[in-house]
Image (spheres, rainbow, N blue to C red):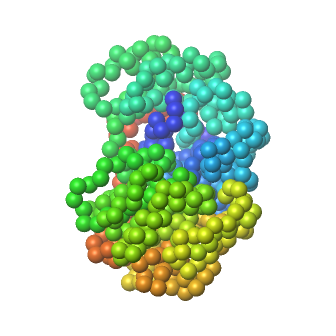
Amino acid sequence: MAALMIQGCGSDVGKSVLVAGLCRLFANRGYRVRPFKPQNMSNNAAVTEPDETGRRGEIGRAQALQAAACRTPPTVHMNPVLLKPQSDVGAQLVVRGQVEANYAALAYQARKAALLDVVLDSFRRLEAEADLVIVEGAGSPAEINLRDGDIANMGFALAAGVPVVLVGDIDRGHVIASLVGAQAVLDAADGGAIQGFIINKFRGDPALFEAGRREIAARTGWPDLGLVPWLAAARRLPAEDAVVLGEAGKPATRRVTIAVPILRHIANFDDFDPLQAEPEVNLVHVPPGTPLPADADLIVLPGSKATLSDLAFLRAQGWDIDLKAHVRRGGRVLGICGGFQMLGRTIADTKGLEGPPGRAEGLGLLEVDTVLAGDKVLEPCRGEVAAGGGAYEGFEMHMGRTTGEGLQRPLLRRSDGRGEGATSADGRVAGCYVHRLLDAGPARAAILGQLGVSARAEDHRVAIDAALDEIAAALEVHLDVVALARLAGLEDAGS
């Protein structure tokens, strides 16, 4: 079967978007396409379809998006190794969708080489069901200090026999040196796997960089496969790295303000992307060191990969004081997953599932208590908002088990009649475990209706799908698609 790997000169050069766009491009041409990322590091994750053992798992959110670009359900084989950072020097290791253990960075270096067989097996499974597999690398292959035991870039590419295209990001500058420098430090085998380069995120007149492209090709010997312009539609896709949260400008005139504090280990922050697109909503991501806005109508506590640590972090910023002042003024609060747990009375992690073992008092705004224990809950869910209706469809992905009288006033009602989440007695504070709650227009309308504003009826997934088509159309124009198809090994790689 055919396969092609997209690697980059660094993180955030646009690999995930390019892979998603290429997945949609070739899917639109009638191919059965599958995305694959051997190893990902992200706290943005999604729940998959059941695997051959009947269990659901979790993979990086970017690979779930790429699966949607292929118009196929996500599976654990699309991202067999997922690292979810829990500290500056440690992460939770998820193998084929299931939590294995927590590892310090140095300890993982010793573990990862043994995962190559797992990675290759998952890749071969995807090859067997597809016409084309498009693989995404991680970081940069030029990080030669990490080459031993590598499974994310050249270690995988050489073991699987997959040709590589290297992407440089011209928006951040230094792109000629990035590509030429990568070629200079790679050994002969790794450098030989690279079959071409792409320049990404170009702004302005392409003619101004023609000489630069020729220079890169001459110095590296790699074919020039295209110059991709700045893709505005990429802004409408879920981001994988929390660094983007501080980049969006604040609209000057919106009816309501919704504030989301950026926790140190914030997870699944793309839950709130649908609010960004709402004409009447000013969505503010509040960075550390900045007070929660006093004029906020709704404060949303997001998910967290290290809930106890982030609760302490929240208090260190003074956000707990801001939050309680907001409630006294009559403001509303919504917590999702880890944020829901923080709103309760207590959180206990006696087994150290998310970091050092411990227990902490919560914010005390909901009558619930949480214990982190048992297998991780990984399941899709659907239903409607309990107060006023409004259908939703999302998923749960958490370790916590939450109990308490607040659950007798559920925020949501599942399709099987069970309650989900909790609300305060006055109905102004609420929380639940459901990720992607705001994607569906009816549920979003129900939540925003409590703030006195109207929501767009469109499902957010429709907007994402349109963005994928727009990106694919741009790549058709700006990339040498025929050359890419031939490199991948597609037999019918004509126009």
Is residue 192 positioned above or below 388 on the image? above
- In this rendering, the count of numbered labels is 0
Residue 20 visible, this orientation: no
Residue 333 as seen in the image, left or right of residue 117: left
**The quarter of the displayed image where residue 395 is located:** bottom right
Q: Position of residue 432 (x, y in %)?
A: 52, 73
- Image location (x, y in percent) of residue 483: 46, 29
**Residue plotted at (49% across, 34% down):** 485
Q: Please state which of residues 437 and 161 is positioned toward the viewer in this rendering.
A: 437
Question: Front-most of 434 and 207?
Answer: 434
Q: Residue furthest left?
A: 253
The residue lying at 45 percent from left, 65 percent from top is 321
Foreground residue, 3 or 122? Answer: 122
| Quarter of the view holding residue 401 | bottom right
Eyeballing the image, is 275 above or below 153? below
Is residue 18 visible in the rendered image? The answer is yes
Q: What residue is rendered at 50% in x and 75% in y?
A: 365
Rendered location of residue 202, percent (x, y): 34, 31
Residue 108 on image: x %, y %: 73, 42
For the N terminus, the quadrant is top right
Instruction: Say which quarter of the image contains residue 154.
Output: top right
Image quadrant in which the C terminus is located: top left
Compared to residue 313, the image places residue 373 above or below, namely below
Residue at the spot 34% in from the left edge and 64% down from the top edge = 294
